[in-house]
Amino acid sequence: MMTLMYALLLLVILALALPIGLLLLQILSAGFKGGRLSPPPSLEADAQIAVLVPAHDEARNIDSTVRGVLQELRAGDRVLVVADNCSDNTAALARAAGAEVVERQDALRRGKGYALDFGLKHLAANPPDVVVIVDADCRVGRGAMICLSSAALQAGAPAQAHYRMALPPGAGLKIKIAGLAWRVKNLVRPLGYRRMGLPCQLMGSGMAFPWALIHRVDLASGHLVEDLKLGLDLAQMRASPVFVPQAEVVSAFPESAAGVTTQRRRWEHGHLGMVSVAPKLLWRGLRSANLGLFALAADLCIPPLALLTLLTLTVAALSSLAGWLLHWTAPAVMAWALCAGLWLAIFTAWLRHGRDLLTFRELAGVPIYILWKVPIYLSFLLRRERNWVRSAREGE
């Protein structure tokens, strides 16, 4: 019995060592300064871009989003807004700003995936060369649309921009640490993979797809993380997404506590729900020699930073207790070595990429942030979020 318990403890430690080791490798690789990122090629003059903007009750944002996107496009390019189950004047404001608009009403089939599928079917009547998906609350960086489109057409695969989340004015400690976690996930880790010649996960906004690829995919679902699932589906078709950090789209964290909690619960429950398919995808990637799929499946195994930290500290504490009671020294040493590796990864990410978000003293508040996240993880076990829920905006 004791031998079995010892083996199980070592197995848990090994299971944690794999995501921590990959996380540390990604972060260290992202900071490697040898080798510059080559710019994407110029976009051919006759290549048409269609920017698809799914929007659900986005009257506060849609005007500025449409006008910002139009400034980055050329004559002949299109902006299509899908006003999805809207109860406000999103559609009218989008038309006034210069977008082409289609409206969709379906109380049963709700979610971003259904809106995107509806928009693609509309575009199919006059298909563009490339489709760029931008969320209705995002601002696009200068040159981002052309940069993304040219990268997607050159690769014949999805191209993902750096999807940056800005902090609201006067952001508190929890939001600042959430900003660091977002930056690690959406910039540092994909940048590390890119420097290793590997693909990235799709992030939901700032995604460009060659029409020849995207029209073959069924997007009609209410999946919580339809972007993550789409990237994995395309990787199985050997069209793994490429990261284009030179292009940037920017959104902002919700200012209300309720909005932040809803947003984090949706993202993290969706991510955790996808982890169960990772072993199957790892095996499929290995068996078919599909390096892109294997790399994305391995990346999927890295849980949210707060959860990974919580699990590692729990295992370290249990290993220390076993070491004290049963004199099991090796598991305790291995578990605390994992803690050191994880904190090295987080500190390196902050040192190289996050000092503009929070100070070193504020970094010490990570344990408070982890405690704040505990109810989100408990609710995954007890009351899992399964339906897409829009995060509340300021003033709503």
Image (cartoon, rainbow, N blue to C red):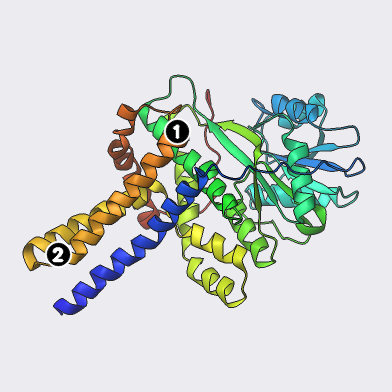
**Which element type, helix, strand or loop, lies under badge 2?**
helix
Quarter that holds the N terminus: bottom left
The disc, 1 or 2, on the residue closer to the chain's N-terminal end is 2
Residue at x 49% of width, y 27% of height: 167
Location of residue 362 by image quarter: top left
Residue at x 7% of width, y 64% of height: 325
- Most foreground residue, 232 or 121: 232
Amino acid under disc 1? Gly
Location of residue 230 by image quarter: bottom right
Drawn side of residue 45 relative to residue 355, left or right = right
Query: How far across and down, in percent of the image, does residue 273 sit?
Result: 47, 59
Query: How far across and down, in percent of the image, does residue 367 sit?
Result: 28, 39
Q: Which residue is mark 2?
A: 329
Farthest top residue in view: 170
Query: How far across and down, in percent of the image, does residue 67 sit?
Result: 76, 25
Label 2: how many Cα within 10 Å (few below 14, some 14–19, many 20+)? few
Looking at the image, is 213 positioned above or below residue 177? Answer: below
